[in-house]
Image (tube, rainbow, N blue to C red):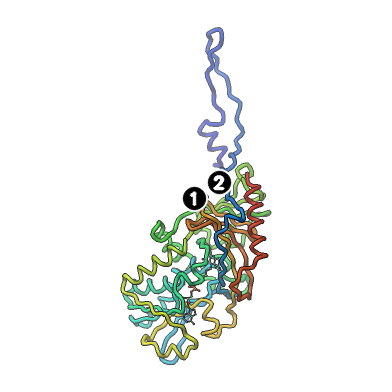
Amino acid sequence: MDRRSALKALGILTGTVTLQACAGKRVTQAVPTPPSQPSVLKLPKVNVQADREIRTVVGLRPFRPSGFVVRPQKLDDKLVVHNYGHGGGGVTLSWGTGELACRNVDQTGEKNVAVLGCGAVGLATARLLQERGCSVTIYAKDLPPNTTSNIAGAQWFPYYVFDSGHTTPAFMQQFVEAAHLANRRFQIMVGSRYGIHWLPNYWLGEQPIPNAGLLGANSPLNDLVAEKHYLAPSENPFPFPVALQFDTMLIEPNRYLPAVMDDFRIAGGQIQVQEFKSIAELQNLPQRVIVNCTGLGAKALFNDEELTPVKGQLTILLPQAEIDYCTLAEELYMFPRTDGILLGGTHEEGVWSLEPNLEAKQRIVTGQAKLFAAMK
Ligand SMILES: Cc1cc2nc3c(=O)[nH]c(=O)nc-3n(C[C@H](O)[C@H](O)[C@H](O)COP(=O)(O)OP(=O)(O)OC[C@H]3O[C@@H](n4cnc5c(N)ncnc54)[C@H](O)[C@@H]3O)c2cc1C
């Protein structure tokens, strides 16, 4: 039953009122049917002005057109289990590919494990190993707040993780399983301690999303996006003809990563700051099993030619506590976090520079200002 029929069934659309006529006679008169269109969503507007900027940051997404790598590799008497190359979805997928990587470790029976990397992927993997009873040491060149994972948005959605047409069915199976495992894990971490909360998102465009897309009608991730529906034209406050709402989690990396590091240390984990310049150096580690979560660092360390940076840039405005939704419009997105309003997006493939691109910043800020000014 649609909304109009439901209201009709409840008797809300065609009611009657009793009037007291001048002559003292009771008259029952039909009330005209009010229009049944849902009214426009009342959403607070983001105040996009150049002087509200508090910082602009850049990060390099570790992207592989064929998708992330989770597989074991024998290196002399060590076993390396790879878990890297998550592109624009490393926070999202971390607990899922971490679980897949741990299954490879399980088969060795080893309980003393090294994890390379202390971003979202390394931390989730390290915690999952601890939960299996392993003693874990993380080795990493940089720790939070100085990892790419600290730059992430981070909306829970595996966006920009692979190029369709470059993946294998085996990868897609891993991807869908990882997304489901990770989504379930993040759900039990919702709350202020980890800086994770649910929010409605509005995807905005000129045309409906293609059925085959990850947000489309045939997506294998449909069960992971709650309340997915197109807004009726009368509800849509955005200056785009199509607005798709779906609810998902927003993870605040600058709260989340330190909280997971605390969990890791409380459970007895050790963290050692160390850079590995070659795989030969891994032979000096005391652990026989090593999980490689070095993100983009895996390109040089393991000579992965497919791995490439996809530069992303965010301009962050002063926080606005009343903004309780995300927007995704073509190449522009807005995520409201407690540490600021994030305005993205750029995807510069093959670019290694960590310098902000001022032209891209201008495009993002101007575009976002236009969008929110035009909102009903
Ligand atoms: C602008 C932007 C927005 C994003 N938004 C989202 C989003 O909304 N949702 C989402 O899920 N993802 C998002 N991402 C993607 C996300 O940031 C990455 O996928 C994720 O951070 C990858 O995590 P990681 O742990 O693999 O890598 P990293 O966070 O880079 O961690 C790698 C670790 O390995 C260490 N390391 C590397 N090389 C070596 C070495 N040789 N020796 C020792 N240690 C080494 C590093 O020091 C670090 O500790 C975004 C990224 C950007 C740039």
The kind of residue on which mark 2 rests is Pro
Residue 64, above or below 73: above
All told, the count of numbered labels is: 2
In this figure, which residue is indicated by the disc labeled 1? 321
Q: Quadrant of the N terminus?
A: top right
| Residue at point 64%, 48% (across, down) | 373
- Residue 121 circle label: none
Q: Secondary structure at mark 1?
A: loop
Q: Secondary structure at mark 2?
A: loop
The answer to whether the residues at label 1 and label 2 have Cβ atoms under 8 Å apart is no
3D distance between C-alphas at marks 1 and 2:
10 Å
Q: Position of residue 328 (x, y in %)?
A: 60, 57
Residue 113, above or below 180: below
Q: Position of residue 231 (x, y in %)?
A: 59, 47
In this figure, which residue is indicated by the disc labeled 2? 44
| Residue at point 65%, 54% (across, down) | 205
**How dense is the environment of label 1, judged by Cα within 10 Å: few (below 14), some, or many (20 and up)?**
few
Q: Position of residue 57 (x, y in %)?
A: 56, 66
Residue 229, above or below 265: above
| Residue at point 63%, 43% (across, down) | 376
Q: Residue furthest front?
A: 51
The kind of residue on which mark 1 rests is Ala
